[in-house]
Image (tube, helix red, strand yellow):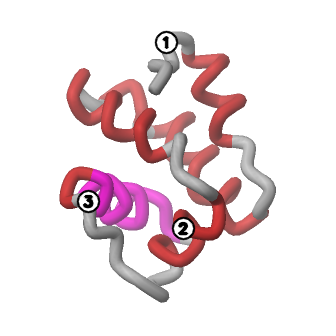
Amino acid sequence: MTEIHSKARIRWACRRGMLELDVLFMPFVEEAYDSLNAEQQAIFQRLLTEEDPDLFAWFMGHKECEDKQLNAMIQLILDRVRV
């Protein structure tokens, strides 16, 4: 897995093929990403490497992400970004 180092690359990685994901990721990156610690930022970057259908299912509550770190990040994003 390649780490995403610059904020511009992170913003680019947040652009997904689904509007539902864009409206979660983009505000989170703009408003909350910089306040995350290094470990949380790495977890967020790892979340961005997941496939859109899985992300959609996790964020919409259709299924639970089995990775505890990713699941915690999903919950953090949902708590910070109310759509």
Residue located beneath label 3 in the image = 67
Left or right side of 29 for 73: left
Local crowd at mark 3 within 10 Å, few (<14), some, or many (≥20)? few
Residue 46: assigned label: none
Q: Nearer the viewer, residue 11 or 47?
A: 47
Residue 45 on image: x %, y %: 44, 33
Seen as rendered, the residue at the extreme bottom is: 62
Closer to the chain start, of discs 2 and 1, is 1
Picture residue at 55% right of the left edge, 11% below the top = 6
Q: Which residue is mark 2?
A: 54
Give residue 74's quadrant in the image.
bottom left
Q: Amino acid at mark 1?
A: His
Please name the residue shown 22% across and 51% down the image.
Answer: 69
Mark 1, secondary structure of its residue? loop
Residue 11 image position (x, y, % from top left):
65, 30
Residue 39 located within the stretch drawn in magenta:
no
Magenta stretch? 70-82
Q: What residue do we see at 34% from left, 78% from top?
A: 64
- Amino acid type, residue under disc 2 in the picture: Asp
Q: Position of residue 73 (x, y in %)?
A: 31, 53
Crowdedness near tag 2: few (<14), some (14–19) or many (≥20) residues, C-alpha within 10 Å = some
- Which secondary structure lies at badge 2? helix
Give the quarter of the image for residue 30: top right
**Marks 2 & 1, CB-CB < 8 Å contact:** no
Q: Report whether 4 appears left or right of 12.
A: left
Q: In the rendered structure, are the residues bearing label 2 and label 3 in contact, judged by CB atoms less than 8 Å apart?
A: no
Q: Which mark is residue 5?
A: 1
Q: Earlier in the sequence, mark 1 or mark 3?
A: 1
Q: CA distance from mark 2 to mark 3?
A: 12 Å
**x and y percentages locating residue 8 in the rendered image:** 66, 17
- Residue appearing at x 60%, y 56% in the figure: 51
